[in-house]
Amino acid sequence: MDGSSFADIEKLEADLWSAADNLRANSKLTSSDYFMPVLGIIFLRHAENRFDVATRQIEEDKAAGRMPKRKVIDQDYVRRRALPLPDEARFDWIMQMATSGDKPLPALVTDAMRAIEEKFDPLKGVLPKDYGIFEPQVLEDLMRLFNSEQIRQATGDVFGRIYEYFLARFSIQKAHDNGEFFTPSSLVQMLVNVIEPDHGKVFDPACGSGGMFVQSSHFIEHEGGDTAKRAVFYGQEKNPDTIRIAKMNLAVHGLTGEIGEAITYYEDQHNLVGGADFVMANPPFNVDLVDAERIKTDTDRLPFGLPGVNKQKKVANGNYLWISYFWSYLNEKGRAGFVMSSQASSAGHGEKDVRERIVRTGDVDVMMSIRSNFFYTRSVPCELWFFDRGKPKAQRDHVLMVDARSVYRKVNRTINDFAPEQMANLSSIVWLYRGQKKRFVALVQRYLHSINIETQGCEPPLQELESTLDSVNDKTSAFVKELQRCKLVADAEKEPILAAVTELQEADTAYRKDRQSLWKDLVAYRKGKNEKPPATTKPQRSALAAFTPLAERIRGLIKQIDLLCKLAGRISPLVASLLSDASDEVKEALPFDRRVVGRELKQLDEVRKSAIEQLRRGIYFHRQASWLLERFPDGKLVDVAGLVKLVSLAEIEAADWSLTPGRYVGVAPAEVDENFDFDQTMHDIHVELAGLNAEAVELAAKIQANYEEMVV
């Protein structure tokens, strides 16, 4: 991704948000005041980046004879998924003109937004223009924030992530409609992974910020396709501000779509009943105010009938309206994937009747349970539903039930998501269900290859660690020699330091011996029969088994590194304690610059973290491959207690037509987990503690502020 590491981009996102939020705080604006203008600045900077790239491509194409040497027209930029920017809409031009003082910066930015809308019809009336709310200096600081060299060099993928990150953070702050405009990207990606929207009409009747379309585009391009040639995006959304966000989101990613303003319960803007190749959505859950009288004749979109009407002639719960819509929009081979309240899969009364009719079609393909805290503004668990109108005849009387509640990654105290490998592993279960064993095997093969790559990458950080440790040891040894010769210090006072140094030296010797032996065996593993990861399950299991003892030794080496650095850090305080009350004569005889040593120890801790992180990468991919092959050793779908079960319609009927996966997959048997991820568990504990500490600080500040107001 833009040549940057995942960690680098995460840090960039967090730094940008923190700085932007501080600017907002200093300007006394609320989140609802400034979130659209901030998204507009991100959009403007990215538009210029895309424009610059397209300009270079045009020049290269002219020089290579791939296009005629004529005057460049707007369509040349559009074809390269860039906006044709007039000068007054160029980020750099705006920043340059702001220094002239002829026109205030807020007016320049507003003019730029208008100029873009005039050039690009899909954005007419969409871009924010209320930059007058900012003091010129605050706006300039905000724009400079998004004009760093790192941002100027960022590609579309990085900008898309930044845009989505800001959407997520605004959702957390409930800046807009309680955050309902944003569906967590890991859930969207999971929907995409299962239905694989690679062509035709892609429809989201509750499109929010347009994340479904963006992820669909990523999927198409990952498969080597051109989104503009393969897919057409249609969306429907009730909130005009959210539509603006969606259109900007599409433009940030170089995409366009037909997004209409409508309340889906009552309107069908695009007339797509029976015409969509793919339907994706995260609709509002458990809505109970839908007017039954207005929709009762909409049999095209509600072919299974209404789920239940109360005395006020309102639909008691709108979940099955949405579920019916998603099914009705599909063509005869269409697929749908959507997020739904966990209550819906086992709801009774009229909802159960609608569910039975849907299940009897044979089009319910996969059900997946997701644990709580995947959403930014609600903590409830949910389920992902998947329809496949073109499901093979042999599978039409079965539904794949996946309970993914035990699969997650803790982001912070209140938010969970899926790691990329977790999403891939869950997707691979669906591949096996569809008979796509080659994809499953290729995923395991990729993990085995990653083991080789990541373990090979351990050498540089380990060498840096050892070099830094040598430097610390050299200074320690020099001091110890002087200490041993010094007659002014009693032996009893020397003893704690000498004992600590001896312990460090012994640990260092043991580490170097074990490290050398481990490295030799890792090289042998990579250069032996595992040099090219096997492409069938049996030798893959053998390769994993061969690496298992090496993984255990890597864990042992990590503990040794931690111990070494801990022991190295103990000596400096002991020396400082010895010298704190010593005479000037002793201090002169035993020179010790604690600041120099402190800097080296800080550097040692940094390289320690880097080395350990790299060592853990190999173990991580071993764990991922093990997760798959332990559950599906032959690359074939089998029932796994607590995770997955292929359920017949007869079983579903016997369970009162429930589609709740946990009701079928059972509970995994208690066992000792040999691959227990201690590091991840400790990470989760620290994340929880950091969240509680942050909340405590915030609460204390509020209490103090409230107290001061009372006193005044």
Image: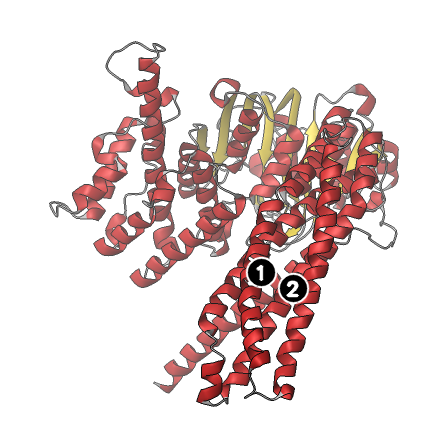
Image quarter (top left, top right, bottom left or bottom right) of the C terminus: bottom left
Please state the total of marks drawn on the protein image: 2
Describe the element under mark 2 as helix, strand or loop.
Answer: helix
Of residues 255 and 546, the one nearer the viewer is 546
Asked whether residue 611 is in view, the answer is yes
State whether residue 311 is above or below residue 222.
below
Tell me which residue sits at (63%, 35%) in the image.
191
Tell me which residue sits at (58%, 65%) in the image.
473
Which mark is nearer the camera, 2 or 1? Answer: 1
User: Residue 89 placed where, x, y %?
Assistant: 25, 35
Of residues 453 and 512, the one nearer the viewer is 512
Tell me which residue sits at (84%, 37%) in the image.
652
State whether residue 588 is above or below residue 104.
below
- Residue at image mark 2: 564
User: Residue 383 placed where, x, y %?
Assistant: 69, 44
Image check: 406 left or right of 493?
right
Tell me which residue sits at (35%, 12%) in the image.
64
Query: Disc 2 residue type?
Result: Leu
Verify CB contact (< 8 Å) between mark 2 and mark 1.
yes
Query: Disc 1 residue type?
Result: Leu
Give the quarter of the image for residue 455. top right
Residue extending farthest left: 102
Give the mark, 2 or 1, whose residue is nearer the N terminus: 1
Of residues 657 and 623, the one nearer the viewer is 623
Asked whether residue 292 is in view, the answer is no
The label shown at residue 136 is none
- Residue at image mark 1: 469
Describe the element under mark 1 as helix, strand or loop.
Answer: helix
Image check: 39 left or right of 583?
left
Q: Mark 1 Cα within 10 Å, few/some/many (few <14, many 20+)?
A: many
User: Residue 393 placed where, x, y %?
Assistant: 80, 19
Distance between mark 2 and mark 1 Cα atoms? 9 Å
